[in-house]
Image (tube, rainbow, N blue to C red):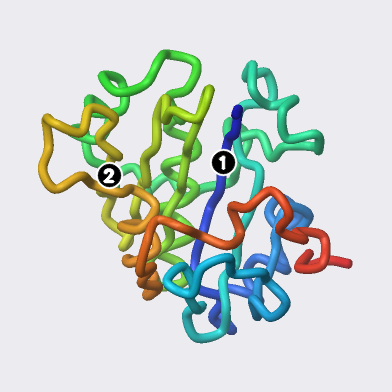
Amino acid sequence: MTWYADEIVLRASDEALESVAASPWLAPFAYHIRSLAGHVWHRKELRHGLPDGGLLVIRPVCGKSSHWSDWHHTEVLDWTGLPCESAAEELLDTEVTQCLSEYLDEESVPPLQLRRAVATLAAGLRQPVFYYGCAMWGGDIEHEYSLVYGPEESIVLTNTIPHIVEPPVDALRAGLHSIGLELPTGYFAPHTRSFPWQAHKLRQ
């Protein structure tokens, strides 16, 4: 199975909804997940909730010329053109830059513009925001990471070689934890292929 996720994720506070809805860059790519009613949970232990107000997800956010951008079968928000404040540079961590360059191939490394933009959003809203990137090929994880902005930058990488790090780290669960959502397992309903994204579009 081939699967990609390229998303900015945050709690859907009133301030976040107002800010994103007013943005000509973010609003067309934004989804407000208020409820998971109707989702089919195949096992009860997979069931999870949502943070207060629901989730606000901006997707897909990647390079327009990236080799995987066509996989999304929809227009992508180009991560090189996002608006940001120049002061956001001070929130970025040089160790994160090095970590990304070592973990990802050159094409997959998120640009500084994306990192500044997500840090700007977190600082402006005064709430945590994270960017989640994942690529799978043949069922195996090629890369998975969360860039968390509180608003200072940190990174969580999913270990793709399980025997090196014990216990294994789950970048998605760590990112969701930062915005107040605890997953009991690695299952996340919005990442199932049947999830009805269009029903949650911020601008219908």
| Residue lying at 29% horizontally and 23% vertically, measured from the top left | 103
Task: Say whether residue 37 is left or right of residue 114.
Answer: right
Q: On the rendered image, what quadrant is the N terminus found in?
A: top right
Q: Which amino acid does label 1 sit on?
A: Ala
Out of 162 and 179, give the one closest to the viewer: 162
Which residue type does callout 2 highlight? Ile
Q: What residue is pinned by disc 1? A: 5
Query: What residue sits 48% from the left and 75% below the top?
Result: 44
Q: Residue 156 carries which label?
A: none
Residue 100 in the image, given as x and y percentages of width and height:
31, 27
Provide residue 74's location: percent of width, then percent of height: 81, 38
Give the image location of residue 65, x and y in percent: 67, 18
Considering the numbered disc 1 on the image, is that residue within a helix, a strand or a loop?
A: strand
Quadrant in which residue 14 is drawn: bottom right
Disc 1 residue crowd, few under 14, some 14–19, many 20+, Cα 10 Å: some
Q: Work out whether 4 lies above or below 84.
A: above
Q: Which residue is drawn at 34% across and 53% down?
A: 148
> What residue does disc 2 label?
155
